[in-house]
Image (cartoon, rainbow, N blue to C red):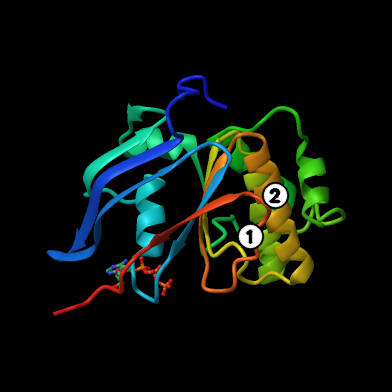
């Protein structure tokens, strides 16, 4: 866990956050926080702004209004990009690199926790034996599992999970739930979007409901 994050303050504290596109509101103003050991389930219909919110928090979008604090400190897009682990709709893998090369590349870029080897992370997500397979030869579910291995290697205390169950079979869904449960038990936090029934692991869960955006 990064030393810069205070243990006393919430992992994430958001006040008056709003975001517009083409001068039309996508969401907000929103107020919410995520404490250690807590999952925040972000709900809303198609177009409500769930992905936009997570991408913005991850530092992949800017132009928001409001205050975003990580561990009590105001955090701009660059600080957020370095402190949050984002699992998006697209796996963010390099198609021609192997599974191991992708993990190595992403860990070099985003950091990793030292207690786990890349091989162990691949085994945990059910990809033992796929170390040398190019990402483009993996199925959609296997690519998602490779992204989960990267997530599991991340040192970031706060996970942003956008539709984490998409493309996964039942054991994959259970894997996500176990990972989230273990991460929260270690004092991490998570924001999770899903359209499916959220098979909530036995952890503290709160809801954030986004209204469907109206285009006028
Ligand atoms: N790259 C983009 N350029 C312009 N508008 C966008 C872009 N991405 C999303 N939008 C618009 O922003 C709004 C919020 O989209 P967003 O993807 O955040 O919704 P969502 O809640 O994740 O939806 P879904 O449940 O369908 O995945 C929608 O009205 C969408 O049309």
Left or right: where does residue 77 sit relative to residue 190?
left
Residue 178, image x and y in percent? 73, 52
In the image shown, does 195 or 81 lie closer to the viewer? 195
The residue at the point 26 percent across, 73 percent down is: 213
Q: Distance between the residues labelled 2 and 1?
A: 12 Å
Report the residue marked by disc 2.
179
Q: Residue 162: tell me if it is visible.
A: yes
In the image shown, does 102 or 204 lie closer to the viewer? 204
Labelled disc at residue 130: none
The answer to whether 115 is drawn above or below residue 158 in the figure is: above
Q: Circle 2: is it few (<14), some (14-19), or many (20+) Cα within 10 Å?
A: some
Q: Residue furthest top?
A: 3
Q: Residue 102: tell me if it is visible.
A: no
The residue at the point 53 percent across, 25 percent down is: 2
Secondary element at tag 1? loop
* Quarter of the picture holding the N terminus: top right
Residue 10, image x and y in percent? 44, 33
Which numbered disc flags the more N-terminal residue, 2 or 1?
2
The answer to whether 116 is drawn above or below residue 149 in the figure is: above
Labelled disc at residue 200: 1
The residue at the point 19 percent across, 60 percent down is: 20
């Amino acid at each position: 866990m990064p030393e810069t994050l205070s243990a006393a303050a919430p992992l994430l504290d958001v006040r008056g956050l709003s975001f517009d596109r083409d001068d039309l509101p996508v969401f907000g103003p929103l107020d919410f926080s995520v404490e250690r050991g807590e999952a925040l389930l972000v709900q809303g219909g198609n177009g409500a702004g769930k992905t936009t919110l997570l991408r913005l928090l991850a530092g992949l979008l800017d132009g928001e209004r409001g205050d975003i604090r990580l561990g009590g400190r105001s955090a701009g897009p660059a600080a957020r990009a370095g402190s949050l682990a984002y699992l998006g709709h697209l796996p963010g893998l390099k198609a021609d690199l192997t599974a191991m090369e992708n993990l190595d590349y992403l860990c070099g870029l985003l950091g990793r926790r030292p207690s786990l080897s890349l091989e162990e992370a691949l085994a945990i997500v059910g990809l033992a034996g796929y170390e040398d397979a190019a990402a483009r030869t993996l199925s959609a579910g296997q690519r998602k599992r490779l992204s989960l291995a990267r997530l599991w290697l991340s040192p970031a205390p706060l996970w942003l999970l956008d539709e984490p169950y998409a493309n996964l079979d039942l054991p994959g869904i259970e894997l996500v739930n176990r990972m989230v449960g273990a991460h929260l038990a270690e004092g991490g936090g998570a924001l999770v979007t899903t359209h499916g029934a959220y098979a909530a692991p036995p952890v503290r869960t709160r809801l954030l409901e986004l209204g469907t955006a109206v285009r006028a």
